[in-house]
Amino acid sequence: NHHLTPFPGEDFQMFERDLPGENASGLSFQTASDKLPLETCETISNSWGYNLSDTSYKSKEQLVKMLAKASGLGANLLLNIGPMPSGKVQPEFQERLAGMGEWLKVYGESIYNTKAGFIKPQTWGSVTQKDNKIYIHVLDSKNASILFEKFPFKKITKAYLLKDKRPVKFISKKEFTEIYTGFSNPEIDNVVVL
């Protein structure tokens, strides 16, 4: 039963149709473990199995944002598809999975082998971390800048966009760190590398 907090000896914690700790679906009441690997299980449509009448497909944009937020929480994303009776995968699913694959070719460094960010996902996006790099996933491009009042790292040596290595302006002081994010482009997720 995945609605319960993990028992001793369990090796990971799964959240159905939810990001750890959010319980938006009403299925995941448990608190996210800080010791076990976490996993979010989601569907591209509303069905786990093949369902001809279910044409409510999540967009590539929704799926990329879900992946960025799951990674920002340190969770694996299991994305389910229900094959057709013929064994084929619906073109709508193929299209979305290929779209995510294209996105990951550019942005995979900010997702693969990263850990949860130093803050949980926010309205503007999420943060992932790996080695000496912090990846700021700017999912809401309306923000001119992102302000961190408690930035847990001593020094930022450089900040740039992951996609094209273009420099990103920032201010880093003892009291706060501000990253300028007024990007006027159609990216789903402007990933800034610190």
Image (spheres, helix red, strand yellow):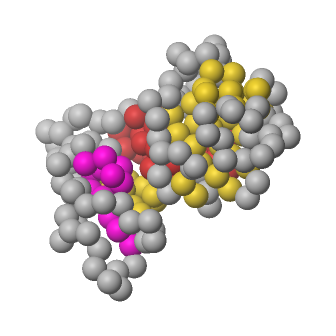
Q: Is residue 43 visible?
A: no
Q: Main secondary structure of the magenta part?
A: loop
Query: In the figure, is residue 21 to the left or right of 139?
Result: left
Residue 14 on the magenta segment: yes
Question: Who's the residue at 50% across and 28% down the image?
Answer: 124
Quadrant where the C terminus sits is top right
Tell me if residue 168 comes above or below residue 93 in the rendering: above
Quadrant where the N terminus sits is bottom left
User: Which segment did they paint magenta?
Assistant: 12-23
Q: Nearer the viewer, residue 177 or 71?
A: 177
Tell me if residue 150 comes above or below residue 14 in the rendering: above
Q: Is residue 137 visible?
A: yes
Residue 108 picture location, percent across and down: 63, 49
Question: Who's the residue at 31% across and 47% down the image?
Answer: 22
Quarter of the image where one finds residue 193: top right
Tell me if residue 182 comes above or below residue 5 in the rendering: above
Question: Who's the residue at 35% across and 68% down the image?
Answer: 13
Question: Who's the residue at 39% across and 79% down the image?
Answer: 11
Residue 144 on the magenta segment: no
Residue 46 picture location, percent across and down: 21, 43
Query: In the figure, is residue 29 to the left or right of 104?
Result: left
Residue 170 picture location, percent across and down: 76, 26
Q: Nearer the viewer, residue 113 or 172?
A: 172
* Number of marks: 0
Outermost bottom residue: 9
Outermost left residue: 53
Tell me if residue 110 comes above or below residue 32 in the rendering: above
Outermost right residue: 157
